[in-house]
Image (cartoon, helix red, strand yellow):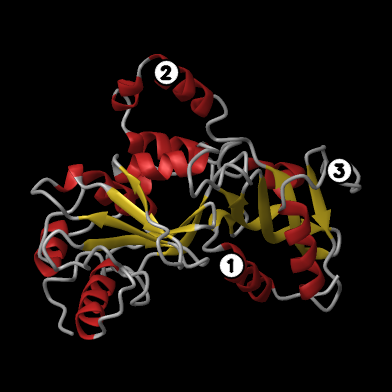
Amino acid sequence: MDEQEILAAVHRLTWPGTGDLDCEEEGHPAGHLCLTPSDGVNELLSLQRALGGRYGQPRNLAMGGYADPTVTATTGLPLLTPFGDRIVEMRAWPYAGRWIGCGTVRSGEGVRLVVLVAEREDPAADLAEDLAEDLAEDPAAGQVTSWVDRVVAVTGGDPARARTVDWAAVEARVGTALPGDYKRLAEIFGRGAFDGFLRLHVPGGAFVSDDFVRHTEWLGEWARTHPSGLWDPYEVYPAPGGLLEWANSEQAHQFYWLTEGPDPDRWPILAKEDVPDSWKRFDGTTAEFVYRLLTDKQHPFSTARYFDTHWFESHGWIEGRGDDYERMGE
């Protein structure tokens, strides 16, 4: 298989409902499928970059012949198990209910390139059901465990890898305090998209479109100088009580806070498609909105209609950018 054939096969195997994964390589357990790169596909970095272009920044499971000893069934172990101590390198991408792996292993001929797709254990198999039962009995039950914790659990996020952001500098630059749970989501997840759909704007994004600070400044100025009615009946921040965008999607959805009132943790969320009069209001926190989008099929922007297992597609983090806004110019 050449590079394009591998990418097509990975796409097909990771889409929900494609059947069981059964590898034909001798001695390999069930639950994964190894793809066979052709002799012409011999550059590990090239293939990893191609996969990264589609599935985001990978997790590093093994390097230089040493596997990360902390890897578990929920963080990528199914990609290492088929190869045992023969593993040399392995990068991993979560996608819905499956893992994508690309690396190298030792073989009789030396070191060979491997690509595989493996089953991914739901990082929160019981969480959504338990929450649904709690909320059915007591709508306030969601306040017991933070909604940020629930987003982390349902996506397999890793709070131990949270980034440091100088929020005082960010908020000074933007001109307002920001919701606390949004700030925690930005620290834990960074740049990227939940279920490959909802793209979080964070300080330090690589582009204006996903950098929270630069996008806020650009959008406010554009709306001021280009009256268009796109946000009617609302105005765009920094207009008093205006819309402040915190996420979007490739499908042209936009997700805003309505900055009414002095407490950002009580700002409602307004979301819309790229069509007139499509506003949907949500009176809850940012993290609750994200969690319900991922798990509630009745949510107007639900990804639960398409995926039973959820993930965060990381787009990386620009080191130093998250705490650099007090020094930035234009």
User: Secondary structure under badge 1?
Assistant: helix
Can residue 203 be seen here?
yes
Crowd around label 1: few <14 · some 14–19 · many ≥20 (10 Å): some
Mark 1 or mark 3: whose residue is earlier in sequence = 3
**Which quadrant of the view contains residue 20?**
top right
Residue beneath label 1, please?
Answer: 52
Residue 71 position, x and y percent, is 55, 41
Residue 126's place in the image compared with 60, above or below, is: above
Crowd around label 3: few <14 · some 14–19 · many ≥20 (10 Å): some
Q: Which mark is residue 22?
A: 3
| Residue found at x 15% / y 58% | 241
Quadrant where the C terminus is found in the figure = bottom left
Q: Amino acid at mark 2?
A: Asp
Q: Which mark is residue 308?
A: none
The residues bearing labels 1 and 3 have C-alpha atoms spaced at a distance of 25 Å
State if disc 2 and disc 1 touch (CB < 8 Å): no
Residue 3's place in the image compared with 129, above or below, is: below
Q: Which mark is residue 134?
A: 2
Left or right: where does residue 272 sit relative to residue 259? right
| Residue found at x 77% / y 74% | 4
State if disc 3 and disc 1 touch (CB < 8 Å): no
Residue 192 position, x and y percent, is 44, 60
Q: Amino acid at mark 3?
A: Asp
| Residue found at x 54% / y 51% | 195
Q: Is residue 302 or residue 89 the one in the foreground?
A: 302
User: Secondary structure under badge 2?
Assistant: helix
User: Secondary structure under badge 3?
Assistant: loop
Can residue 80 be seen here?
no
Q: Amino acid at mark 1?
A: Gly
